[in-house]
Amino acid sequence: MTPQRAETLEWLVQRASAAVLAVCVIVHLAVIVLAVQGGVTAKEIAGRVGGSVPWLMFYSVFIIAVALHAPAGLRNILREYTPLGRRATHWVMAGVCALILVMGFRAVIGLYGLGA
């Protein structure tokens, strides 16, 4: 893949993941605001969300979007402010992506297991 094509793909991934994140953040915050207004505790929320396949799927999409979006932005910062080359930057960001995925899915799977 040419560097120009890779740049275009990175741009598209960041924009698409931003659109998904916007929806996920709005849903996440709306649910929190609605739940807290009724005086629901964190334990009650975990009981409702845990074991729910639709919430598991929602938060899985959320995590994947974050794992794609954040490294794309950080990659640009690394390219501008560090002497790292394109290949090194790619591998550092692959590691960041993997870290976000592992941490995010650990949290989601843990929450899902609370309701089981």
Image: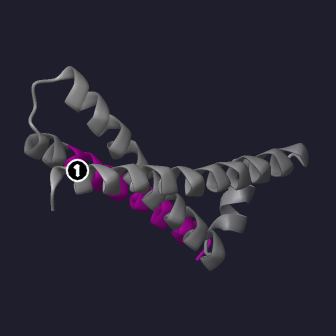
From the viewer's perspective, is residue 96 above or below residue 55?
Answer: above
Q: Main secondary structure of the magenta part?
A: helix
- When asked about the image quadrant of residue 68, the answer is bottom left
Total residue callouts: 1
Residue 61 spot, x, y in % from top left: 52, 65
Residue shown at 33%/44% (left/top)?
A: 71
From the viewer's perspective, is residue 24 above or below residue 39?
Answer: below
Magenta segment boundaries in residue numbering = 93-116
Amino acid type indicated by mark 1: Gln
The answer to which of 18 and 111 lies nearer the viewer is 18
Residue 19 spot, x, y in % from top left: 58, 54
For the residue carrying disc 1, how many other residues have a C-alpha within 10 Å: few (<14), some (14-19), or many (20+)? few
The answer to which of 49 and 7 lies nearer the viewer is 7
The answer to which of 102 and 7 lies nearer the viewer is 7
Image-based side of 73 in relation to 44, left or right: left
Residue 105 spot, x, y in % from top left: 41, 62
Local SS, label 1: helix
Image-based side of 28 in relation to 72, left or right: right
- When asked about the image quadrant of residue 93, the answer is top left
Looking at the image, which residue sits at the far right? 38
Q: Which residue is mark 1?
A: 4
